[in-house]
Image (cartoon, rainbow, N blue to C red):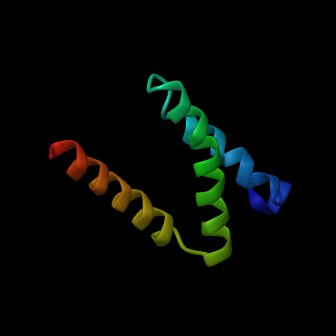
Amino acid sequence: MYRMIGPSAILLQAVPFAMAYIGKPELETLTTVLDGAGFGWLVWRTNSFFYPFLIQWSLNVFVRLVAAS
């Protein structure tokens, strides 16, 4: 997608990312557009999916630990 439309692809890919959060609290859904764009930018700059995956995984583990205690 980046080859076809350039840097706008980073924002465009954030929309389906945010759609996965529909049904959750509104603020969480809206902030995922920024999160998705940030993750897209990170993938673009590092040329690796590993770092956004690691960040998302770490956040999920943290939230589960906090919620469990």
Position above or below: 57 against 14: below
Where does residue 67 sit, x and y in percent of width and height? Answer: 22, 42
Q: Is residue 61 left or right of residue 18?
A: left
Q: Which of the 4 quarters of the picture holds residue 44?
A: bottom right
Q: How many marks?
A: 0
The quadrant in which the N terminus is found is bottom right
**Residue at point 44% right, 63% down?**
55
Q: Is residue 25 left or right of residue 40?
A: left
Q: Which of the 4 quarters of the picture holds residue 54?
A: bottom left
Give the residue furthest to the right: 5
Give the residue furthest to the left: 69
Give the residue furthest to the bottom: 46
Q: Is residue 57 left or right of residue 65?
A: right
Front residue (pair 9, 39):
39
Front residue (pair 46, 26):
26
Where does residue 45 sit, x and y in percent of width and height? Answer: 67, 74
Where does residue 14 sit, x and y in percent of width and height? Answer: 64, 45
Position above or below: 32 against 27: below
Where does residue 46 sit, x and y in percent of width and height? Answer: 61, 77
**Residue at point 48% right, 71% down?**
51
Give the residue furthest to the front: 69
